[in-house]
Structure formats: structure tokens, C-alpha cells
Image (cartoon, rainbow, N blue to C red):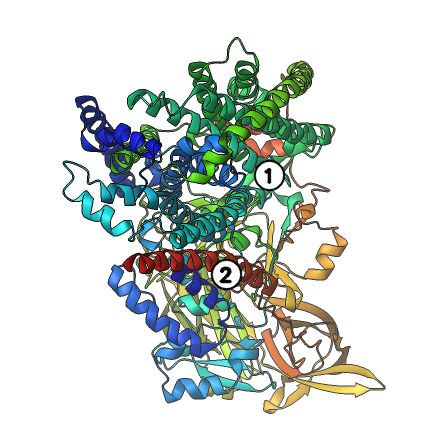
Amino acid sequence: MYEDEKTQQNLYAFKPQLEKMNKMGVALIVFLLLVIGVGVYALYIQIVDGHAVTGMRDNVVWGLYIVNFIFFIGISYAGALISGILHLLRVPWRTPIIRMAEMITVISTMIGPAYILLCIGRLDRLPNLILFGRIQSPIIWDVIAITTYLSGSIIFLYLAMIRDLAILRDNPVKNARWRNPIYRFLSVRYKDTTKQKELLNVSTDLLSIVIIPLAILVHSVLAWIFGMTLRPGWHSTIFAPYFVIAAVYSGTGVLIMVMWIFRKIYHLEAQITKIHFNYLGIIMIVLGALYGYFTFSEYLTSWYGSIKWDMEVLYRLFDPTEYWPLFVFAVFVGVLVPIIIVTVPKFRNVNSIAAAATIAVLALWVKRYLIIIPTLETPLLPIHDLRPEYAHYSATWIEWALTFAGIALFILLFYLFSKFIPIIPVVRSGEEKDYSRLRKIVFEKQMKKVIRQNKKSDRVITGMIILLMIFSAPGVLAQDENKIQPLLKLDYFHVDSIHNLTATLRAKVEGRFTPLEGMEIDFKFTQGGSEKSLGTVLTNEKGKITLPIPDDIIATGGDNGLFSFEAFFAGKGNWEKASAATTMKPLRMEMSFFQKEEEKMVNLRAFELGKDNQWVPVENLDVLFYVPRTFSLLKVGQATLANGSASLEFPTTVPGNRLGYVTLVAKVEENETYGNVEVNGTINWGKPLPVTKIIKRGLGDTNAPLWMVYTLIVLLSLVWFHYMYVIFTVFRIRHLGKS
Amino acid sequence: MFFSILILLQRQFISFSNQQNNHLIFQILNIYKGSFGDQKLRTPPLMKSRSSNRRNFLKLGIATGATALIASGGNVLSAFTASENKETGEKIKLLTPEGKLVEVDKGHICCQPAGNLEAREGLPDKKMVMVIDLAKCRNARKCLEGCQKMHHLPPHMEWIKFYLMRDSEDMTPYWFPKPCLHCNNPPCVKVCPVGATFKRTDGIVLIDNDRCIGCKFCMAACPYSSRVFNWEEPKVDQNPNQAAYSPETSSPPKMGTVSKCDFCPDMVRKGELPNCVKSCPNGVFYYGDKNEDAVTNGTDTVRFSELINSRAAYRFMEELGTEPSVYYLPAVDRAFDYKEGFEGLTEEEIALYKTEANITE
């Protein structure tokens, strides 16, 4: 099979790549491993000491890691869009670059998510993402989208490799004892029969159709992580398309860089020609112009609207002492320089286009930095922190080490992969050859036209950007050693027919009253000159102690109904001794509820202990009415007793429980004669609590709104159905190869 | 990959308020947690033991609708932690929804911190709100001191932040203390990928530090900068009384997770005010239950509806649509000159406040 001249030539040209590694290659691998080693060490420190070793703090919660994450996912676009679209359009010159593009996709989609893992404080809890995952969260969207995208990219890359794997199976590679069985296994008995060829072509087409919208969705989801927050500079509707365009721009740039590097190290000048650089350069500057347009639109809108917070971010970006130099590089240099290099024929050659691509890629990395950091440094409320690292982000060596480790890993994987399979497809399928000449001519003509038009539109865009520069530039600047006398308070409480004495011991320390805990208080009952001890008790943490008065004392009737009590504190350590006394008359109160012509009333009657232990009605006594609430009593009214009785309108507006039950407390407070007396009653006259409807599905609930679930299911099943079909086709190809 | 996605989706069809499902999932989780050697995930006490006492107690229906209960010291409790406790012999009076007073052993009611699952539910029939009286604030920072002491926070971890606000150039600045606003439409809860931060029925937004993966998305999403991160192993004095971690007490803090003001639901369960309210010398903070229409700052108890209407209260950045549970009373008839708030601050800090408020003098 594949006995055609071109394929044999290719095989002859590329096989040495797989068979030997020169000294430079070994040195490169060692160097890359060293860089990765430093990164691993940095990661170890970060895991042991916590994220405090990074530059990230409470306001700038994400730093270089997330910048790298966006960057790597961004360059993964090269494969998906460039190779997908070029494949579908059957563009003849795509063949030599298509595998590199797909490899960029797979490798960067593997490295990108590793950076988001570095932002996560508790890596040990990652399984929670599956166990408790909430599909309302953009992070879960990302998890789902990236895993799906990575799976698709791997399948796509593999489909495009099957023909080459078959060739390598038939022409075993030297010095590759363990690789040859892998080739044999992965080539799924592909023999290029008509049926096999047809199945393979259909699957590849199908997958390239699926992968394009998927890639757009992946980067939109990434943009929505930022777009969904209420942050100035992030909360923007154009964020998703903006990210998509920036991603394809940087992806094309990286593809050009990769092409240039492999052209140099494997001497592929015959396969990757100037025409490839020219065409890709043109695609890149068209995307660059679009990216410039989106940037202009984004900043013009927020500047014109001039909302306070948007302006704060803009001032930061346009401040020469802060981000203006980076902004100039990311937006002006990153767009204009590649456009000038590619459009002016004099400057246009393989090396300069590669340089232009490098500038674009670097500018895009800086742009991601400018999207993340200034916004996080500008929360809606000012950062009030004197520690400079909390107000301004600056990456630590840990973050840089891991950044370079990621880049090193990218290069390493790429290099190793190019040792596994030729970086340029060996097999040329027949269909391309038939069209190629004709298409080439037509396409070149079209491209020339595009370039001509592009020059004009570039001039307009350049003019606009220069105008923006001109307009924005001026706006840019814009205890004592002595003993302390504590205070002892003695109160009498009569609640629900229980008589209590409460003593409170406090002292003024540094101007504030503090309770004294664990102090001994003696209680005494005095009657007609004789004293009776009620006991000694310790104060609690609030400096308080409550002592019930024994019934037999009440039964004595006191001195004509008057009872005298004393509390005494003997002093301890720094605290002087203190004493307090109270005299009171027992008071009995009764509460009742009644309804008088629609009016709901409360009636309170009070009696005092008179002569001969008789209860007699009380005159002129102020009573306060309360409703108990969670923390305290809410006052709802007051009344003065006349002839031992008072009535009050029931506070029907006070909320009760679900059935409307409210407890009403009537109190006599710190009365000279009666002390503190309290009585309560409960009735369902309050406002019943409304039964609140609990929404089970919503953005803030455990379960997502149904439309979200269904959308996700539909989208995912569409994509995964195609994947399954393609995998099934691969098995069919294998089955067909048997006969 | 594919199966993980399937598990994720399948979860959407399990109702989490259903106890039986919970039970099953918790069994699975315990196995998982055990294998990873992480903190033990506490089985919800409701399922762990059902002594006859407890069951009878629950049958009273207090769990669903208790409003007021009157304890011996005049303390008013209205909700309780349904956790496994010993009997103490001390009785407490409770009011059932039917208006009957019953006596319950105190041991059934307090004081174990709530388990992870009950902490997600919220106190029954409550809707906690806070009212902050800006006219009385003079930046004394006692609230923060009290908060840090109670939650055993490291000195730099501030759950309440202070800003010197100036609405426009012609206006005099005023002090603005800001706890977590416990939004009813919380941006932080929406974005949490694992449901580690959640909104409860009583309006409180809490964080489960046993579940949080530390992605910090909630911190980026919160427009009020209310959240802080444990960047390193928290250096705090261990609370000797702390039995186990509970989302309601937020302590002990855990490295690599997010924390914030929790509105002290553990204190609400005990019928006590949060420390910020208690520590404020000027009575700036009013806290209470909106369903009871009452808020208190420790000395005064007022009708919530009357207070916010008579003083024209507003919610901070209402235009964001986050619907905070914290109301601010505008700084009219101020009790203090804003300059008094500079007392005790360092020169640097005063300068920073002045720049933030655009004061040039």
C-alpha cells in the first residue's frame, strides 16, 4: 500500500527523525527536565507551606496560574479551528502543518488545566468536583467542556495518524523495539482498502465538524468564569467572543512558531515552505485585526459609559506608573507590529513572520495578565490593607518556576511526540493531489485580493487605534495596682410564682464594667433584727447568681408583708468587699385574654400581700408588656394599674409562630416595693408566620434549573454520540482489516 | 471522563432534602473520606441515634415550629441543636406550635455544634437580619476585636472591615463597618463548584470548610470583598471548648479554604447575640429575626420594620441585585465627628483612609 512516489519520498525523509537522537536533542531533554524539576520543587513547597508562598492574596486571588491557564487553552485553538476548518475546506496546503496544529491542541489542553489545579487550595479534595459538582458553576462547565474537548482532540489527532501508523507498521523503525508493537496495535489493521478509507474519511470529517463549535464553546465557557462575576473589566457581554478571537490569534501564532522551530531542527524546508508561512501569517493578521477591534470596542464602551468602577480599572491600565507600558505592548505592539510585518511585502519572509507570531503570542499572554490582575486589584470597595502584597500582586519565584515548567513540559512533550510519529504526515491522500494545483492558483489569487483589501482596512484600524491613543493619552493622569471596689447589685424576681434573688457582681476595669466570675456571695434574710442565712453561692461567667427563696420564708409573712434580704461579698484578691440589700413585698399578677366587640384585649390583675397574709388589689402600679424574641424582649405596650386591674389592646401586628401563637410577658421592673415581678400568657392572636416557598432548583441551590440540566444533556449527548460513533468506526476498520 | 460527567448529571435528579437519599450518599461519602484519610465527615446526628427520649422529644413538633421558649433565667431561646447530648437533669420550658408549654431536658437542646448536614438546613422559621446604624459608628473597632476573639481568628484575618465612605466630594465622610452581607441572591453561592458555600433557609450564607476545595471563585465573585482565604496553616490559639468543626462555628479554620463572617448561627441557637453586637460600645449593630420583626443591639429591642422605615434604611449597592440581609441606617444626626475614628490608628493607616475618601487636608 501507498506505493506512490511522494509517500515513499516522505517516508525516506522523515524516518531518521524517529530513528536517532542527536546530542542537541539529548541536551534539550535534560535541560527541559531540569526546568520541570525546579517546577516540581516549587509545587512541593506550595503544597507544604500553603498558597502563602505565592503572590496571590485575598484580593488578587488568582495570579499567573490562571493567566497561563487561559493562555494554554487559548493556543489549543490552533488544532481545533485551524486544522478543523482547513480540513473541511479541503485546503490543499494544509497537509504538512495539520499534525503540528493537532498536537498543539492535545498537549496544551493537557497542560492548561494543570494550572487551574495549582490555584486550588485543597488538591486532596478534587473528587468533590464529581461528588458534589453543581452544574450552575462556570468551573464545572469548564471541567465538563475541557474533558470533552480533550477527548475529542485526542480522537481527532489519532484518526489523522492512522494512515501513518499503518505505514510505520509496514516499514518498521530501527532502534525502536517497544515502539513497533505500539504502531502495530494502534494502526488497527488499516490496509487502505476502499471501505476502510471511506470509513476513515467520514469519521474525520464528522469529528472536524464537531470539534469546531466545541472549541468555540470551550473558550466561551472559560471567558464566562470571569464574565459571570460582578467585577468591573470582567462583567462584559462580549467576553466570550473576545476570548475566542484572542485564543485563535494566539493559537495561530504558536503554530507559526512551532512550524519555524521544526523546520529548523528537522530541516523540513522542502515540506514547510514560505507559502505556508505567508498563508498562516495572513490568517493571523486577520485574526489580529479582529482582536484589535474587540479590544477597542470593549474599552471604548466602558470608557464612554464611565461607570465609577469601570473607570477605576481603566485608570489603572492607562496609568504610566502601573499598567500602561504592558497595555501598550499587549494592545498596540501586539496588533500593529504583526500586521505591518505581514502586510508590507518588503518585511515579509519566513523569519520575520515567525518573529511577528512570537510578538503576537507574547502580547496575548500579557493581555491575559491585564485582564486578570488589574481587575482583581480593583474591587468595588477599596482594598484597605497596609500590607503591600495584599494591595498589589507580584508573582513570586514559585509561580514563575511553575510557569516555565509548564512551557518546558509543552516543549518536551512536543519533542518526544515528534520522536514517536513524524511531525508531518507521511501519507498524502489522493484526493488532495487532484485538486491541489487548481486550488492553489485560485486560492493564491483570492489571498492576494485579501491582502490588498487588508492593507486598506488595516490603515483604517491603525488610524482608529492611533486616534484612541491620542484621545486616551491625556486622560491617563489622572489597670490599677490599688484595690478595686466592685459593684454588687441585688434584685428580687418573681416569675411564674417562683421567687428568686439575683445578685450581680461587676467591677469597672479600664472604663468598662466587667463581670466577676467565681466569687462567693452570701445571702441573708433579715426579719425583725434576726438574721437567717440562705447560703453561699459562686457567681457564673456573667458575674450573676440566682437563688430561689425557700417557700417557708415567704410563708412567714415577713414584717407586715415586707421581706428584707442582704447579699454580701467578702472581697477577694484585688477586689474590695461589697454588699447590697433589698426589701420587697410579694406581688401576685394574673394575665387573661378577652375579646370585646372585635377588639382583642389583655387584662392584668395584681395583688399584694397585705395584713394577715391576705392578697389585696394594688393601686397605681406601672406594668410593661413585652413579647419574647430570639435574643431579647420586645416592648409592645405599658399600662398603669388602677384598682388592681388594667386592660391593654393586644398587639396583633406582632408575628407569632406558624399558628400565630404569641407569648405576652407583663413585667414590673425594679419597683421599690415589689422588686421585679413577671407573669406571662400565650394566645394565638399574633400574625401567623407565612409559609415560605422553598425553591429547590436555582442558581444558588443544590440542584440546577431544569433548562440548564437539559441544555447540558443535549449538548453533551450530541458531542459524545459523535465520539462514540467514531470510536465504533475505528473498531469497524479493525474488523475489516481481518479479512 | 465520560462517566464522571454522567455522575455529575445524575446528581441533578436527586433531591437533597430527602433524608433517605442523604443517608445513602453519606454512607458512600464516609467510605470515600476514610480512604483519603481526610477529616471525618460527621454523620448527621439525626440518623445516628434515635433513643426513645429523643424521638418523643421530636414528636412534640418543636423542631418544626418552636417560636419562643422561656428558660429559667428569663433567657429566650427559640431554636436548638438537634444533636446527641446527655441528659443534664436541668429542665427548660419550650413553647410548642400549639401554644403548649412543655418541659424539656436542657441536654437535648444545647450546646454541641451543629453537624454538617443540619448546618445546611438553617434554623426553622427564622430569617436573620442585621441593621447597622452608621450615625453611631466612630470606628472604635470593638466589634472586630470581639469577633476575632470569639472565632479564634489570626490577627490579620478580618471578617468585619471598616471603610471611610464619602459619597461625593461635597459630603462629609462617615465610617462604614461591613460584615458579610448574607445576600439573598448571593453571587458567591451561585459560582461555588461543589456547594461548599450555601444559602440556608434562615438567610445565613455559610461555608463548609470540610468540603471547600479552595478554588477562590467565590472570592472573585463577591462584590463586597467579604471573603478571606487561609493562605497558610492558621496560627491560632486552639479553642479548648471546641469539640469538632462545624460550619456554624467556622472554627477551627483550615488551610487552603475560604472563610468569612458567619452571622453566628451557633450563638442564635443559644439565644445569644453575636460578639460584634455585644462588643460595640455605641450600639451600632442591631441583630434579629425578620420573621419576628424585632432586632436588638443588646440594650434596645425595636421593631425591625419600624426601624428601617423611620430611619430610611438602605442596603449597600442594592443596584447589584444581590439583596443583602444587612441594612444600613444613613449617617444622619451623627453622634461623632468622623475624625474621632482616627484615634488609635497609625499615621500610615490614617493616610490610607484619607486617600480612599479623597480627603485633602
Tell us which disc is closer to us: 2 or 1: 2
Instruction: Report the front residue among A495 and B258.
Output: B258
- Other-residue count near label 2 (Cα within 10 Å), few / some / many at <14 / 14–19 / ≥20: few
Q: Residue A496 bears which disc, if any? A: none
| Residue labelled with disc 1 | A241
Chain for numbered disc 2: A
- Judging depth in this view, the residue of A711 and B96 nearest the camera is A711
Three-letter code, disc 2: Ser
Looking at the rendered structure, the secondary structure element under dot 2 is: helix
Q: Residue A728, relative to residue A205: is it above or below? A: below
Q: Is residue B159 visible?
A: no
Residue at point 68%, 27% (across, down)? A300
Q: Where is residue A347 in the image (x, y as percent from the top left)?
A: 51, 10
Percent x, y for residue B203?
57, 62
Toward the viewer: A497 or B226? B226
The quarter holding residue A707 reads bottom right
Q: Which residue lies furthest to the right in this view?
A: A597
* Picture disc at residue A717: 2
Residue type indicated by callout 1: Pro
- Which residue occupies 30% across, 63% down? B33
Q: Earlier in the sequence, mark 2 or mark 1?
A: 1
Res B66 seen here: yes
- Disc 1 packing (10 Å; few <14; some 14–19; many ≥20): some
- Quarter of the picture containing the C terminus of chain A is bottom left
The total of numbered circles placed on residues is 2
The quadrant of the rendering that contains the N terminus of chain A is: top left
